[in-house]
Image: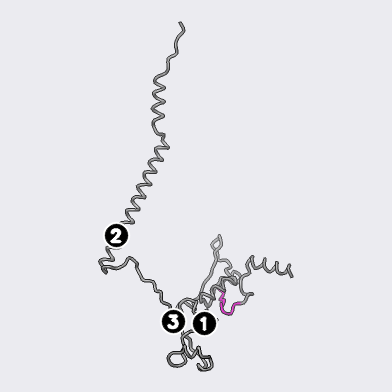
Amino acid sequence: MLPVARPLRSSSRFNRATALRPSQKQHQQQQQQQQRKEQQNEKKKKATRYAEECSRDLERLSPGASLVPYEAKTTRRRVSYQTGRPAHYQGQEADDACEGKGGECSVGQEVTGKQQRRSQQQHSKLNGCDLYVCRTTKKGEFGCSKPCWRCVSWCRWAGIKRIFHWSVEEGRFICLKVGDASVAECYETVADVRLVRSRAVLV
């Protein structure tokens, strides 16, 4: 008789057991997911606790107060200007708008471009400030930081009077008055060079 091959029971049992068991990577991934869920739950709990504590503090200080820390001012300042000529030289609209003594009138329909720019600017206390500009290289040294005409125009709109930029040639800060700045004193960018070249080619 020929010998009959018997199946290896031990190996089949081992394979079944190993197939059901999760691998080491899967076990680590499961642990990491569980830790992330726990961290997220802790963050949510901390946020709710912080909100509750803030509301309690506000109620202690002033009962019935809102959670907003401050009230935003929605009213705008009334701009006024002082005229140099009598009111009858400025038309009937200026006569209707005049209030008080000394020719001090509130801005009505007669608004010039200069006054409109002033009204669009920031508060008068913030106007007239100086701006220092410096640029650092990879070596940690100061580089040239000359502003372009776009920067100068934005600074003029914001109410900045002077810009101090670093000059590598002179090794010091140079003062540039925003109101008197010309195009030659501003930095010429790559876009400006391309525009000049395209205009020269067209001409």
Q: Nearer the viewer, residue 129 or 69?
A: 69
Q: Amino acid at mark 1?
A: Gln
| The C terminus lies in quadrant | bottom right
Q: Tell which tag, 3 or 2, sits nearer the viewer.
A: 3
Q: Quadrant of the N terminus?
A: top left
Q: Residue at x 39, y 23 (%)?
A: 13
The residue at 28%/64% (across/down) is 57
Judging by the rendered image, the residue that carries numbered circle 1 is 115
What's drawn in magenta, residue-wise? 173-181
* Amino acid type, callout 2: Glu
Please say if 135 is above or below 118.
above
The residue under label 2 is 52
Q: Nearer the viewer, residue 64 or 44?
A: 64
Q: Which mark is residue 78?
A: 3
Q: Earlier in the sequence, mark 2 or mark 1?
A: 2
- Image check: 48 left or right of 200? left
Rendered image quadrant of residue 8:
top left
Taking the spot 44% from the left edge, 89% from the top edge, the residue there is: 99
Marked residue nearer the N-terminal end (1 or 3): 3
> Are the two marked residues, 2 and 1, in contact with CB atoms closer than 8 angstroms?
no
Expressed as whole percent of the image width and height from the top left, the position of residue 157 reads 53, 75
User: Residue shown at 29%/68% (left/top)?
Assistant: 65
> Which one is in front, 158 or 139?
158
Residue 20 spot, x, y in % from top left: 39, 30
Within 10 Å of the Cα at label 2, are there few (<14), some (14-19), or many (20+) other Cα atoms?
A: few
| Secondary structure at numbered mark 3 | loop
What is the distance, in whole Å, between disc 2 and disc 1 at their CAs? 49 Å
Residue type (three-letter) at the residue carrying disc 3: Arg
Mark 1 touching mark 3, by CB under 8 A?
Answer: no
